[in-house]
Image (cartoon, rainbow, N blue to C red):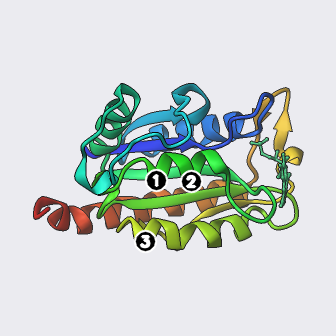
Amino acid sequence: MPTLQIVIASTRPGRVGLPVGRWIEETARAHGGFDVEVTDLAELALPMMDEPHHPRLRRYEHDHTQAWSARVDAADAFVLVFPEYNHSYTAPLKNALDYLYGEWAHKPVGLVSYGGVSAGTRAAQQLKPVLTALSMTPLVPAVAIPFVWQHLQDGTFVPDDTLTGSAGAMLDELVRVEAALRSLRATV
Ligand SMILES: Cc1cc2nc3c(=O)[nH]c(=O)nc-3n(C[C@H](O)[C@H](O)[C@H](O)COP(=O)(O)O)c2cc1C
């Protein structure tokens, strides 16, 4: 079965990203299309980009980069869980993406964004050109959560039917696109 890597991209204490990420993880496990792994960027704790060489060369000098490279290499598909900060996505997410290059290529990515009235959609739109620069395929079906704090009950994320439906549609598409891109990955 292909491996899905879910990346939780907010790192501040008390972040909503953790309950949202747990909900997506449970949903993906119940969906059954992937073996599911989770990376919490707060736990990964990458320093600001400190590799001397372009990631295209894979001449990594630091253990933290080697470990991150291996984890991303092993994944066939991704779901990124991120809030909107000042109409964009988070700095730790950009840093984690920039660390690597070929490890991301020809892999599909589902976007789970959240925020206030915008539901993180401005952040998602800014993220897409970065993902395509890495030869990733961002999906059209996505999960966009407006007024995210209204879905929290005692620290747990409680989705409504719309969000549950969006998550299912995104995961279904992730299965289809992952299978379609597999031949491209085989030729790299
Ligand atoms: C630095 C910062 C900037 C923010 N900017 C936006 C924004 O541009 N649009 C928005 O909808 N919400 C914004 N918010 C509110 C966040 O959507 C809300 O705080 C959310 O819980 C942040 O995700 P997190 O808890 O996982 O960090 C911002 C929050 C922070 C901390």
Disc 2 designates what residue?
94
Under tag 3, what secondary structure?
helix
As drawn, the residue found furthest toward the front would be: 52
Question: Which numbered circle lies on residue 132?
Answer: 3
Give whichever of discs 1 and 3 has the lower sequence position.
1
> In the picture shown, does residue 61 fall above or below 129?
above
> In the picture shown, does residue 84 fall above or below 130?
above
Question: Which numbered circle lies on residue 98?
Answer: 1
Asked if disc 2 and disc 1 are in contact, CB closer than 8 Å, the reply is yes
- Near-viewer residue (23 or 136): 136
Q: Is mark 2 within 8 Å of ligand 1?
A: no
Q: Is mark 1 within 8 Å of ligand 1?
A: no
**Would you say 45 lies left or right of 55 here?**
right
In the rendered image, residue 72, in percent from the top left (x then y), is placed at 35, 43
The amino acid type of the residue labelled 1 equals Asp
Question: Which numbered circle lies on residue 171?
Answer: none
